[in-house]
Image (cartoon, rainbow, N blue to C red):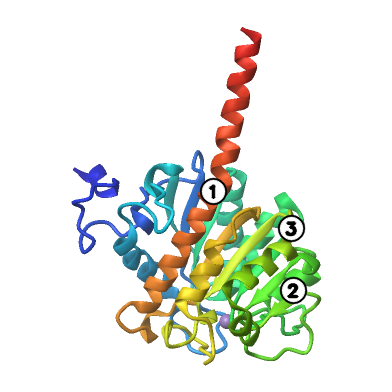
Amino acid sequence: MIEEWFSNNPNLPTFAGPTSLFRFPYGNPEGADVVAWGVPLDLTTTGRSGARLGPRAIRAASTMISWGKSFPAGIDFKSALKAVDAGDCIFDHGIAQDFVERIYEFADRIVSANAIPLTMGGDHFISYPVIKALAKKHGPLALVHFDAHPDTWPDDEKRTDHGTMFYHAVKEGLIDPKKSVQIGLRTYVEDHLGILCLDAPWVHENGAKKTYQAIKDRVGKQAAYLTFDIDCLDPAFAPGTGTPVPGGLSSATALEIVRNLNQIDFKGYDVVEVSPPFDHADMTALAGAQLLLEMYLLAIQNHLPAKSGKKTKGKNKKNINS
Ligand SMILES: [Mn+2]
């Protein structure tokens, strides 16, 4: 029956059945802890397009890792939280000026439902309206930003693209640069706007452990947002992207860093810039899906203590009173 297709049935074939992210059931944000959703937009790319096909490819690739328990912690992630796939943000590609508001509305609905957005891009611009919706609730966010590019190139007020949206986000006070950090960069920008930059050579020299420790030191207890542009990975590991730059992180290094970002108060996560037309053997889509799984596991670690803490507190109170 249809519900079995979304269950943790070990006999569920990876090559057939539904392609929601991690085979989460489809559903609305209200009542969910984590909401996966896609933003199939690539209208602001400066290089090769195709990231509009990213959400579909990431979902399909995710069926390969949607079963069993997580590695290495052995978390039964399918039942740890209430997670849903809320589908894709819909906008009319013929009304380009409309899409910022459409993405913001979708993100705001997730945030208003007290759920954590787990977003699939789309080009990197899509992080901007999501951050805007989160900052409205939580104040300026610490940005943890994996990328080959700074995306803080200066821009004027009338335009934004996938290389300038964080310039606007800092200028608008959506991001707190003093608490923010960029990882894996290998393109030059004159001004990082006060954001700490651990560029790719720094990560290669210092390794994963010093990198995640530096990120945690930088962010502290600030409400944070994790965004992963897949081009942070070397093109050898992620060829399917619009603006690849040689000299990037390996999948192994990136996964180790992200896996160890527990104890950061992430309010949302995304993976962007997966462009299936330039991919081979689904390797970039699979890397994106694996990173989203690591982010979801972070959400479980961060969310569960709060949930069970509330329950315990309630129970204790009741016991004392009774
Ligand atoms: Mn990039």
* Res. 94 in view: no
In 3D space, how far apart are the residues under numbered discs 2 and 3 (Cα atoms)? Answer: 23 Å
Of the numbered discs 1 and 3, the one sitting upstream in the chain is: 3
Quarter of the picture containing the N terminus is top left
Judge from the rendering whether residue 220 lies leftward or rightward of residue 301; answer left or right. right
Query: Which numbered dot is residue 198?
Result: none
Q: How crowded is mark 1: few (under 14 residues within 10 Å), some or many (20 or more)?
A: some
Please report whichever mark, 2 or 3, sits nearer to the chain's N-terminal start: 2
What residue is shown at x 66% (from left), y 80% (from top)?
151
Residue type at tag 3: Gly
> Which numbered disc covers residue 168?
2
Q: Which residue is label 3 attached to?
A: 220
* Horizontal and vertical percent position of residue 92: 49, 68
Q: What residue type is labelled 1?
A: Gln
Place of residue 171 in the rendered image (x, y in percent of width and height, measured from the top left): 80, 71
Disc 1/disc 3 C-alpha distance (Å): 17 Å
Q: Are marks 2 and 1 in contact (CB under 8 Å)?
A: no
Q: Provide residue 142's location: percent of width, then percent of height.
A: 72, 62
> Residue 292 or 90: which is nearer the viewer?
292
In the picture of the structure, the residue carrying the numbered disc 1 is 301
Instruction: Out of 189 and 234, give the one closest to the viewer.
Output: 234
Residue 295 seen? yes
Q: What element carries label 3?
A: loop
